[in-house]
Image: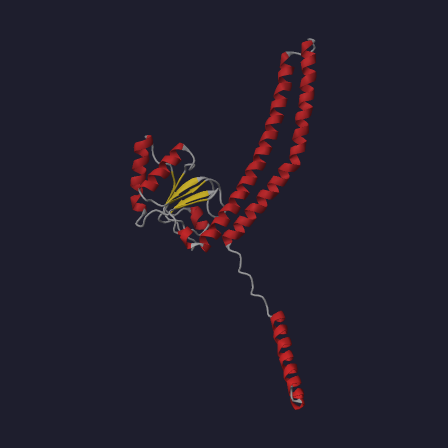
Amino acid sequence: MIDRKLIPLCASLLLVAAAFSVDAFAQRKTRKKPAPKPQTELAKLRDEYVKASNEYKASLAKLLPFHEDRVKRAEEKLEQSRKLFAEGLIPRAHLEESERAVTDAKNEVVKIQRDMTTADAQIAGIFAETEAEKQIAKDLRLARQSLVRTSSFTRFTGTPGWSLGDAYKVQRFFSDTFKKQLPVAVFGQGAIHDRWRLDHRNSMDISLHPDSAEGQALLNFLQQKGIPYLAFRAAIPGTATGPHIHIGRPSHRY
């Protein structure tokens, strides 16, 4: 049994402990959360690009019903023109004009649908590339892999020792294989790289789509020789203006 003389002491200790607990809880509640990290310039560019793409797609979605209705009206007019032509009431030129109107209207609908699909693909590419960068940052083993692929780009790390002084090897391979000059868009640092603050001094950009026959041949050669590259299949805000092959290490921001 507890000595009755100790009861007041125990009660005091309990009160002190409770006070400390309340104070600690209050401190936890009032403790400020760490400020979020400021958004990088590249992240801002990508967000703006996604926003603009979504707005563009929304504007196309508003136009689509109008052009679909235009197709319907053109087809109705064509049907009337065929009847009138069969009865000899209009010349063939008028019938052909109605046929062209239907074709033009349908082509416009196809173009709008294609542009909407392209906008979706570009947005998906941005998300895929961003996610790939996050995974590479989390997993060093992935970063050390020789080949990393996403829907928008492929990266080959190659072997150490590449320099722009070896560019002649690539140019010679391409001219020997395709009997024409390598389509070099930028050799070393370019104006676009200055604007985006990318160090491109030891790289060159080639105006070839990586999925084309010439692009595939070039990528195979680069891999065989251990030459690092990045092959872009689409524009990536702040990184690539469009499909091309970047030969050299990734351009780091400065």
Residue 58 appears at what percent x and percent y?
63, 40
Q: How is the image coloured?
A: secondary structure
Q: Nearer the viewer, residue 171 or 185?
A: 171
Residue visible at 63% across and 26% down?
Answer: 105
Q: Nearer the viewer, residue 107 or 213?
A: 213
Residue visible at 61% across and 43% down?
Answer: 55
Residue 216 appears at what percent x and percent y?
39, 36
Left or right for 133, reference 106: left
Residue 247 appears at what percent x and percent y?
37, 44
**The N terminus, quarter of image:** bottom right
| Quadrant assignment, res 30 | bottom right
| Above or below 65: residue 132 | below
Residue 122 appears at what percent x and percent y?
53, 41
Left or right for 9, reference 131: right
| Quadrant assignment, res 75 | top right
Which residue appears farthest toward the top when viewing the image?
Answer: 88
**The C terminus, quarter of image:** bottom left
Residue visible at 59% across and 33% down?
Answer: 113
Count numbered badges in the picture.
0
Which residue appears farthest toward the front when viewing the image?
Answer: 1
